[in-house]
Amino acid sequence: MASKTIEATDANFNELIKSDKPVMVDFTAEWCGPCRLIGPSVEQLAAEYDGQALVAKMDVDQNARIPAQFGIRSAPTLLFFRNGKLIDKVIGAVPKAVLEQKLQSVM
């Protein structure tokens, strides 16, 4: 199955979070063990909420401006947006149920 996650970049981020749908952005890195742990959960949520929410991943090694703007100091960090505004945040590897609860809270 093709990935439903969107690649977020410094260039497209501000447009992405202005979606009329809730947006979850996973700030991740290739070398990050905890990122690899939650990666499958993020992918599952992207598929399960396809059409209802946007799920994006941003590589913090390839994009510096947006992580700095939001004070991202550790990966994974997940930010939840509604109408372009930051609503919630999760830092570290957490169970899928926690991510889903946060995503539903911004819907």
Image (cartoon, grey):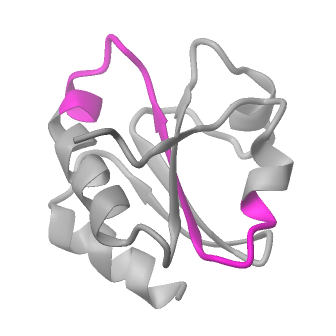
In the foreground, 58 or 70: 58
Q: Is residue 103 left or right of residue 13?
A: left
Using the image, determine if residue 105 lies above or below residue 36. below
The image position of residue 82, as x and y in percent, is 68, 78
For image coordinates 49% across by 78% down, the residue present is: 52
In percent of width and height, residue 19 lies at 74, 68
Q: Is residue 53 above or below residue 66?
A: below
In the rendered structure, which segment of residues is drawn in magenta?
A: 17-36
Classify the position of the N terminus by image quarter: top left
Instruction: Confirm whether the magenta stretch covers residue 68.
Output: no
Left-right relation of 18 to 97 = right
Q: Say which quarter of the image contains residue 6.
A: top right
Viewer-proximal residue, 85 or 54? 54
Residue at x 31%, y 67% (from the top left corner): 99
Residue 41 vs 9, above or below: the answer is below
Query: Looking at the rendering, which quadrant does residue 85 occupy?
Result: bottom right
Q: Is residue 77 above or below residue 33?
A: below
100 vs 69, nearest the viewer: 100
Q: Report whether 36 appears left or right of 90.
A: left
Q: In the image, what residue occupies the spot 31% across and 39% down?
A: 2
